[in-house]
Amino acid sequence: MTPPDTRAPRFGADILRIALRRNIGAMVAGTVLMGLYQAGETAFPIALGLIVEHTLQHRSPGALGLSIAALAVIVTTVSLSWRFGMRVLQKANTTEAHRWRVRVAACGLQPVARDVDLKSGEVLTIATEDADQTADIIEVVPLLISSLVAVLVAAVALGLADLRLGLLVIVGTVAILSILSVLSKRIGDSTQEQQARVARAGAKVADLITGLRPLHGFGGNHAAFASYRTVSTEAKHQAITVAKVNGAYAGAALALNALLAAAVTLTAGWLAFEGRITIGELVMAVGLAQFIIEPLKLFSEMPKYVMIARASAERMALVLTAPPVATPGSERPSAGSDLEVDGVLYGTLRKLKFRVAAGEFVAIAAYQPRAAADLAAVLAVRVPPDAHEGAVRLGGQELGELSVEAVREHLLVNPYDGEIFAGTLRTNIDPSGTSRNVAEAVEASLLTDVVALHREGLDHAVRDRGANLSGGQRQRLSLARALAADTDILVLHDPTTAVDAVTEQLIARNLAKLRRGRTTLVITSSPALLDAADRVLVLDDGVVTAEDSHRNLLATDAGYGAAVAR
């Protein structure tokens, strides 16, 4: 397999050149095979004309049998060349689309690595539809060349019969392509705009679904729905515009191709009537006039697909060329490192400072939910290191000095709204299939009742966003995934807000037991989790105002008791 091109493409044209260059072998093979297919298709009416001519002159059964054998060879060549040619091209197309999907997704998954004015829904569209349409260029070029071969073979064959027939095909083809090139540019521009508007609509509906419950809470759902209707209507109108342009293009291509075929047929009939071509040549000309419609149709459609591929490549370039917000380092922390937050000033955090020693279980009782969210964002590297004052260190090394892969390997921040994916319970808990403690994670998170409830057990199907699970089940599934990762440092943000008090108490005990000897930080107001921690830090007004065990704080700090009591 050709190694991936790691150079950053600057424009859509660069992306297309990279795709063409690294698939040159498959494209050459596909072009040869598809050229054989088109040549065989063109040879069929030529062979029929020769058979008619030969039969009328010689009337030999042997010659007729030889002609039929030649037709069989042509048919076999057409069948096999098409089958293997399309197999080669489609394999290369699918592989190339996958490469670009991975590359765009990698940019989207890098925390705070890309400064792109696109929402996640738009990036998703670029990584799927645009990647597929860009990779289509690998099929388009060989099909374009093979169609050109068919047109040229037909023009040469007709030209040998009569020069005027050959010139008619060449001049007509040039005229058709000139007319359609204008429409193809319009299609490219319209498609690029449509993709952008559809992506914006997708991003808007994703935001709407995520925030539907709080929107209902303060009555903002009607305004949100109105905003989505506006974006959706714009996308619909643009889709209609693209459909109209595509329809005009297809209609014009079909009409022009049919007009050229009719012109060739009528000209051949007139020449035969005048005695300037033979009956066999007339049969060949009529057959080629009917056949040439298909390669001409294919040939005339290719500019449209080239423009669509270029438009999609330009959208991918938006993501791939976006400058990094923060350039990650290359260092790696040592295993069993401690976690230190040193004077962090960000959002509601005011010079926040604390340290969690290696192997320690610490809980943070945040009196303001916003402060808890800001702290989780900083620890998850969703905030660029230069966007806040102070430093976050793993084993004495600042996060900015570490590679993203190293941070993810040693530090996992599990958000309170962890995403649930379509798949199974097992694939949600262990997406990579490499965890060795799935059973322990399921037991510690008390997901055992969900597993036991279904005959398939861990292979029970889960719908996208966990639509077939309750809120508590989704939260426990997210917690099980975090525990199964078994990272050196685990940060949990409100992991038990959707479960009952008894379940919460059991989860707290299991969590402390399973994570014993591993560094764990829980941002929570749960009395059970606070009690299970080695010590509790009180986060009030962006700073640590108290530090002790949960029970000592209850006995000595009335404000703490009021804040965490349920």
Image: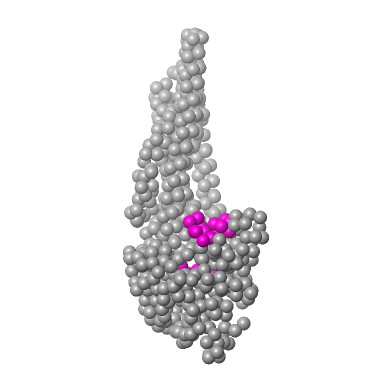
Q: In front here: 470 or 69?
A: 470
Image: 301 above or below 409:
above
Q: Is residue 170 visible?
A: no
Is residue 155 placed above or below 8 in the rendered structure? Answer: above
Q: Quadrant of residue 384?
A: bottom left
Residue 520 placement (x, y as % from top left): 47, 72
- Quarter the C terminus occupies: bottom right
Q: Position of residue 549 (x, y in %)?
A: 50, 83
Residue at 57% in and 63% down = 442
Is residue 379 a member of the stretch shown in magenta? Answer: no
Magenta stretch, residue numbers: 412-438
Q: Residue shown at 51%/61% (left/top)? A: 437
Left or right: 330, with 470 as reference point: left
Q: Is residue 35 above or below residue 526?
A: above
> Can residue 310 be seen here?
yes
Residue 390, position as x, y percentages in the image: 37, 78
Residue 432 is covered by the magenta coloring = yes
Residue beneath the point at 54% across and 74% down: 494
Q: Quadrant of residue 387?
A: bottom left
Q: Quadrant of the N terminus?
A: top left
- Look at 51% across and 66% down and name the residue there: 483
From the top left corner, tell me how far across and down residue 77 is, in percent: 46, 26
Between 75 and 443, which is closer to the camera in this rendering? 443
Q: How is the image coloured?
A: one colour
Report the front residue among 256 and 537.
Answer: 537
Q: How many numbered marks have been drawn onto this rendered protein structure?
A: 0
Residue 429 or 167: which is nearer the viewer? 429
